[in-house]
């Protein structure tokens, strides 16, 4: 095992997986909080069209994914609150982007392995360019999140009150969607277009079933994301299977275990309010 970790491509895989898992878990917390999981799913399919289109003209698939997802994220961000309840429109864009990607894939028939990597992830073939791009985008994303954490949290939990108090909800929505696009692009590198939920939504959704405070939930989400990624990599190395399958499998199993666990302990966490008659009696006595 130690000999395997000495290979450069294994080191690149663990390093890129760690970076992407951290960013995806933090962004994923706000995705779940803002109920925009379907928008993230749509961005991944739009990224598929960008990746196959870039490969068709001889450009890096990662670059094409960045361009397409960011353009789509800007459009979704400008919709602001109107994006909620637009599942039909988003679904149509998703279907069109997937069809466009299949068309590009049909025209680009010289390298089927790259197409499979786009769909299911190719973390074991990460290049130094991919790693550098992931590090830069992760630093930018985390820095922006740190700056706008409190107003974004306020706008995500109660957008009407936040807007009434002068919080730039529209601008925050645009910036967040761009950050989501960057994160989706990075996650595609690890688990592919079809399994992007495994890193983007599963850790945050699982953490929200266990913890309630925002910072605690985010820390737990990061820990789960790292556990899924590292566990998937180790299982893939030992069992010689696809990394994305093991990551998605671990994420799904832990989430399915977390839901009944929450429902089991939640009655014990609930404390009923004092009886109304007792409160009234106490008030009268005073």
Image (cartoon, rainbow, N blue to C red):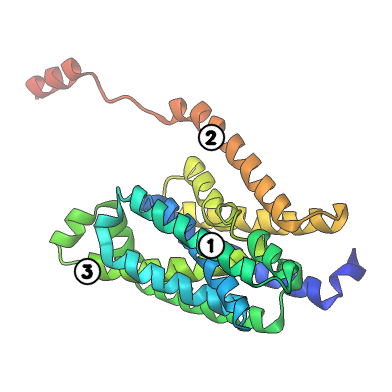
As drawn, 32 above or below 187: above
Note whether residue 267 is visible.
yes
Q: Secondary structure at mark 3?
A: loop
Q: In this rendering, would 252 be left or right of 175?
A: right
Q: Quadrant of residue 60?
A: bottom right
> Residue 61: where, in percent of width, then height?
61, 76
Badge 3, how many Cα within 10 Å: few under 14, some, many 20+? some
Upstream in the sequence, badge 3 or badge 2? Answer: 3
**In this orientation, which residue lies closer to the viewer: 286 or 122?**
122
Badge 1, how many Cα within 10 Å: few under 14, some, many 20+? many
**In this orientation, which residue lies closer to the viewer: 122 or 58?**
58
Which residue is label 3 attached to? 168
As drawn, 142 above or below 222: below
Specify the label residue 24 is tagged with: 1
| Image quarter hosting the C terminus | top left
> Residue 279: where, in percent of width, then height?
17, 22
As drawn, 179 above or below 161: below
Q: Quadrant of residue 74?
A: bottom left
Count the marks: how many? Answer: 3
Tell me the distance, in whole angstroms, between the alpha carbons under discs 3 and 2: 35 Å
Q: Residue at x 73, y 55 (%)?
A: 232
> Residue 91: where, in percent of width, then height?
41, 51
Badge 2, how many Cα within 10 Å: few under 14, some, many 20+? some
Upstream in the sequence, badge 1 or badge 3? Answer: 1
Q: Residue at x 65, y 72 (%)?
A: 108
Specify the label residue 49 is tagged with: none
Note whether residue 30 is visible.
no
Tell me the distance, in whole angstroms, between the alpha carbons under discs 1 and 2: 21 Å
Q: Secondary structure at mark 2?
A: helix
Which residue is label 2 attached to? 259
């Amino acid at each position: 095992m130690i000999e395997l970790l000495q290979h450069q491509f294994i080191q690149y895989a663990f390093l890129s997986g760690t970076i992407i898992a951290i960013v995806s878990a933090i962004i994923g917390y706000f995705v779940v909080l803002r109920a925009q999981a379907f928008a993230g799913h749509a961005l991944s399919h739009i990224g598929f069209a960008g990746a196959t289109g870039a490969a068709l003209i001889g450009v890096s698939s990662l670059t094409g994914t960045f361009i397409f997802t960011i353009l789509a994220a800007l459009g979704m961000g400008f919709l602001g609150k109107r994006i909620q309840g637009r599942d039909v429109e988003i679904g149509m864009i998703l279907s069109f982007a997937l069809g466009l990607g299949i068309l590009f894939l049909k025209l680009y028939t010289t390298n089927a392995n790259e197409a499979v990597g786009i769909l299911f992830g190719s973390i074991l073939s990460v290049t130094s360019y991919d790693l550098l791009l992931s590090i830069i985008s992760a630093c930018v994303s985390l820095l922006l999140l740190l700056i706008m954490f409190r107003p974004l949290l306020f706008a995500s939990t109660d957008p009407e009150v936040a807007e009434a108090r002068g919080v730039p909800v529209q601008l925050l929505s645009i910036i967040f969607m761009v950050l989501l696009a960057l994160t989706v692009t990075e996650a595609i590198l690890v688990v592919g277009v079809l399994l992007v939920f495994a890193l983007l939504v599963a850790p945050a959704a699982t953490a929200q079933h266990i913890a309630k405070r925002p910072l605690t939930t985010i820390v737990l989400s990061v820990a789960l994301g790292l556990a899924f990624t590292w566990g998937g990599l180790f299982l893939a190395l030992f069992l010689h299977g696809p990394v994305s399958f093991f990551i998605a499998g671990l994420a799904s199993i832990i989430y399915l275990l977390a839901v009944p666990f929450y429902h089991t302990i939640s009655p014990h966490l609930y404390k009923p309010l004092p009886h109304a008659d007792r409160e009234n009696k106490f008030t009268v006595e005073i």
